[in-house]
Amino acid sequence: MAWFKKTRKKIAAAEKPTSRVPEGLMVKCPGCAQILYNKDLTTNLNVCPKCAHHFRLTAAERLRMLFDDSWVEYDSGLASTDPLGFTDTKQYKARLKAGAEATGLKDAVVTASGTIDGVRTMVAAMEYEFIGGSMGVVVGEKIARSIERAIDERCPVVIVCCSGGARMMEGALSLMQMAKICGGLARLDRERLPYISVLTDPTTGGVTASFAMLGDLNIAEPKALIGFAGPRVIEQTIRQKLPEGFQRSEFLLEKGMIDLVVDRRDMRSVIANALRFMGAKRNEPVTLPAPASTAPPVDIVDVVDVVIPPST
Ligand SMILES: [Zn+2]
């Protein structure tokens, strides 16, 4: 009965038509769904020329956008030691390695000094591609050191936030960075040196809850997600529908949480003008007089200490 058995070839999958457009040449804008030339986008500071959608920048692109020319990078060798030996769905060590391979950095921030329109400034730019721009011990240490360097050299500080919050793989150690950076910023403030916080998409969690909101000027990019907890968590907690545009820059500006919403193409000149307004000078470090009073800063305990009479 051999004629019943037909030897058939399996149905082969159709060959994928090969695209003649090389990969990475075009990109689709999530704002207006237009197809854009990557080259056009790069020359426009990664802002869509059609609808002004702001694409995310890497830390290096951010520094290139802010500084006049070259810059000096600090503490690039600092790397996390995985102090808790942490493992979730993946080993933390493996995540660090993947982050380093994706970005060429050792952690999620680049700190550098250079000039912004002639004003010498310390800039810390966060890198989202490195474990979601999360703030661990290294991020905290690098930012704290750059603030201390700014105090020594009497120049202003700009921090560009782009972060999912504190790095939970370092547990409480990552949360301590919030206090450490805020302490540094308080010293910077006592030295009467300006600090500008630039909030980009996204700025959330422990970063929003600490240094991102402490700027003498808090400037956000348009339509950036800025918040502490995500909208889903808030909706589940308060059992209410959240308003349109909640946690976006424009909404926060309307509610008085931030000072300015600035298009990335104007960001450098706005920052330079603000720094000069706050006392920085072109081509020289800020030379503001030291605080007149040498009295120690007000101890917070003195302010809140209330004597409660013994109950009878
Ligand atoms: Zn667009």
Image: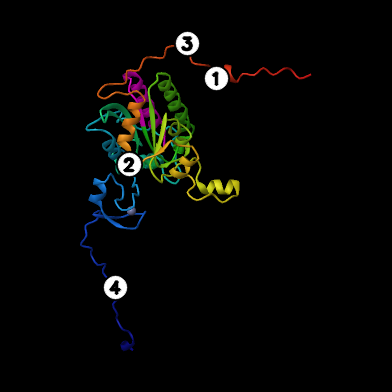
Labelled disc at residue 12: 4
Tell me the SS state at disc 4: loop
Distance from disc 1 to disc 3, alpha carbons, whole Å, reads 14 Å
What amino acid type should be assigned to the residue bearing mark 2? Arg
Q: Earlier in the sequence, mark 3 or mark 4?
A: 4
In this view, 201 is above or below 171: below
Return the mark for residue 22: none
Q: Which residue is mark 1?
A: 300
Q: Label 1 is placed on what type of residue?
A: Ile
**Which residue sits at x=27%, y=38%?**
65
User: Where is residue 146 drawn, in percent x and y?
Assistant: 35, 26
Mark 2–mark 1 distance (CA, rounded to whole Å): 38 Å
**Residue type of the residue flagged with mark 4:** Ala
Give the percent coordinates (x, y) of residue 147: 37, 25
Stretch in magenta: 134-158
| Other residues around mark 3 within 10 Å, as few (<14) / some (14–19) / many (≥20) | few
Foreground mark, 1 or 3, reads: 3
Rendered image: mark on residue 295: 3
Q: Nearer the viewer, mark 2 or mark 1?
A: 2
Magenta stretch secondary structure, dominant: helix
Q: Is residue 307 above or below residue 23?
A: above
Q: Secondary structure at mark 3?
A: loop
